[in-house]
Amino acid sequence: MNTGKLIKKYILVTFFVVMMAVSQTLCMKADIGLCACWDSVSLNVWQITGLKAGTFSIIGNLICIVIQILMLRKDFHPIRLLQIPVAIIFGVVVNFVYYQVLLFDLHSYPVRVLFWAVSYLGLAVFIGGLNLLGAVQIPVESTYYTASSKFGIDFAKLHITCDALLIITSITLSLMFGLSFKVREGTIGGMLVLGPLTKWCMGWEKKFIHE
């Protein structure tokens, strides 16, 4: 790949990561349940400790990269280190948009649902684009793939198990500390629509991204 195409590719990667983060904050603002169960826990932690959700995301994603290094050791390819700026960009954008831009309240449930729907459409478009570029993965997903390949664990089962543990953690924190529930109807809806919607988006994005 020539230098021009490589630069264009990583500009697109940066754009997709930024817009994924923006899309995620819309779902956080809707507050009817997060599909990314990791983010449910991050909002619980913010409610308890004041640690911002994006900062929690950065820390968690960096831990995931360390786990990949420990699993792969000498087979850890340096290109995977690109996950570090991805994690940082994602977390910084989440913090900025959620805590500095989306300062208004959503009182109407239909408006909350609209924010949720726009969020998942955005996530599907930008996750699909990132997948098609094949340049770098979100660290959490990359860790799932690495563990699945390394230990012969079914990827889907591993993903579902980890999501279930995060859901249980979020609900437990909400009950223990009297917090608002971050696992709600939007969580179920998101888990049902995100996969098929991403696949559909990738179908029409392919011809644009591969040009």
Image (cartoon, rainbow, N blue to C red):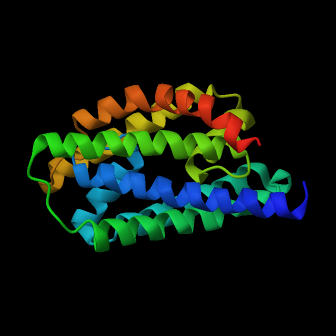
In this picture, residue 69 sits left or right of residue 54: right
Residue 63 in view, yes or no: no
Q: Quadrant of residue 13?
A: bottom right
Where in the figure is residue 6, as x and y percent of width and height? 81, 59
Question: With respect to residue 10, does 175 lie above or below?
Answer: above
In this picture, residue 32 sits left or right of residue 70: left
Where in the figure is residue 117, as x and y percent of width and height? 31, 39
- The number of numbered discs placed on residues in the rendered structure image is 0
> In the rendered image, which quarter contains the N terminus?
bottom right
Question: With respect to residue 147, does 6 lie above or below?
Answer: below
Where in the figure is residue 146, as x and y percent of width and height? 69, 42
Residue 134 in view, yes or no: yes
Residue appearing at x 38%, y 72% in the figure:
96
In this picture, residue 121 sits left or right of residue 148: left
> In the rendered image, which quarter contains the C terminus?
top right
Residue lying at the far right of the rendered structure: 2
Question: With respect to residue 121, does 92 lie above or below?
Answer: below
In this picture, residue 176 sits left or right of residue 162: left
Q: In which quarter of the image is residue 113?
A: top left
Residue appearing at x 45%, y 67% in the figure:
93
Relative to the observer, which residue lies in front, 83 or 152? 83
Residue lying at the far left of the rendered structure: 107
Residue appearing at x 61%, y 44% in the figure:
129
Residue appearing at x 71%, y 28% in the figure:
152
